[in-house]
């Protein structure tokens, strides 16, 4: 009989939910192959926790309370680094929030928390698999023609880079095609198909993946 994993997550915005839901599910599923028993990963649950008026630490605390109420086994916490390094975000946001949350909760509650911290922003992970990105845009232009020649985590504004790639993909047309996508169309499908192998080339995704492994260890599913 299979064991199960139930996962909740919080993000910075609604578009992050659409992309990261697929990435979280697929990453957990991928790592079940390293476990010593059969494990079924339930679809991740985006937690409806308002962050209005809350500090980041209090937002994580409220999410942990919600995860406990819903009997979720793992809580994934997303925040963008908004920088070319994730060091400050881990030191000044993630680590203090995780410590604060554990201190504020009842002693018998020990939330199993996993950080998701893309360098710059979530859209950098969407740039990790340029073939998938171009397929979803619907173009056969080269990476160079679309301005996609830099490493994803070295791009200062990944969101604008994707928007510009879409514009360049269709700039030969006299007017906007009915079939032209917008960046908002890309989050959910890319979350489902972006190559995890290519994502794993990014240090920020490697940290997330290792944090998932640690979550499995805390559940005694991985040793």
Image (cartoon, rainbow, N blue to C red):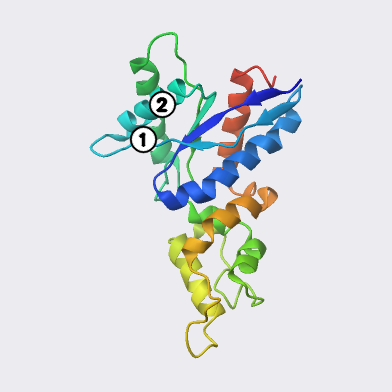
Query: Which residue is at 47% across, 69% downward?
Result: 163
Q: CA distance from mark 1 to mark 2?
A: 8 Å
The answer to whether one can see residue 119 in this image is no
Residue tagged 1: 49
Do tag 1 and tag 2 residues touch (Cβ < 8 Å)?
yes
Quick check: 139 left or right of 33? left
Q: Position of residue 142 (x, y in %)?
A: 65, 75
Establish if 13 lies above or below 5. below
The answer to whether one can see residue 32 in this image is yes
User: Which numbered tag is attached to residue 11?
Assistant: none
Going by the picture, which residue comes out furthest to the left?
A: 53
User: Which numbered tag is attached to residue 66?
Assistant: 2
Q: Secondary structure at mark 1?
A: loop
Q: Position of residue 120 (x, y in %)?
A: 44, 52
Quick check: 165 left or right of 139? left
Which corner quadrant holds the N terminus? top right
Q: Secondary structure at mark 2?
A: helix
Q: Position of residue 40 (x, y in %)?
A: 69, 29
Quick check: 211 left or right of 64? right
The front one of 196 and 46 is 46
The front one of 59 and 99 is 59
Query: Which residue is at 50% across, 21% downward?
Result: 71
Establish if 222 lies above or below 119. above
Which corner quadrant holds the C terminus? top right
Q: Tell me the crowding category of disc 1: few under 14, some 14 to 19, or many 20 or more residues within 10 angstroms, Cα based.
A: some
Q: Tell me the crowding category of disc 2: few under 14, some 14 to 19, or many 20 or more residues within 10 angstroms, Cα based.
A: some
Query: Which residue is at 69% across, 34% downward?
Result: 31
Q: Earlier in the sequence, mark 1 or mark 2?
A: 1
Establish if 139 lies above or below 60. below
Asked which quadrant contains residue 77, the reply is top left
């Amino acid at each position: 009989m299979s064991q199960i994993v139930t996962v909740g997550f919080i993000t910075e915005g609604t578009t992050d939910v659409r992309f990261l839901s697929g990435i979280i599910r697929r990453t957990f599923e991928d790592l079940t192959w390293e476990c010593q028993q059969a494990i079924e990963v339930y679809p991740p649950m985006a937690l409806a926790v308002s962050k209005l008026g809350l500090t980041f630490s209090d937002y994580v605390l409220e999410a942990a309370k919600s995860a406990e109420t819903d009997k979720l086994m793992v809580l994934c916490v997303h925040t963008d680094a908004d920088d070319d390094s994730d060091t400050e975000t881990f030191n000044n946001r993630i680590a203090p929030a995780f410590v604060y949350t554990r201190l504020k909760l009842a002693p018998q509650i020990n939330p199993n928390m996993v950080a998701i911290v893309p360098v710059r922003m979530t859209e950098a992970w969407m740039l990790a698999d340029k073939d998938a990105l171009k397929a979803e845009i619907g173009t056969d232009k080269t990476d160079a023609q679309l301005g996609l020649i830099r490493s994803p985590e070295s791009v200062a504004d990944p969101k604008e880079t994707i928007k510009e790639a879409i514009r360049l993909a269709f700039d030969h047309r006299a007017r906007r095609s009915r079939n032209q996508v917008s960046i908002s169309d890309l989050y959910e499908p890319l979350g489902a198909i972006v190559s995890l192998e290519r994502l794993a080339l990014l240090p920020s995704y490697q940290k997330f993946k290792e944090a998932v492994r640690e979550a499995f260890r805390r559940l005694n599913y991985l040793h």
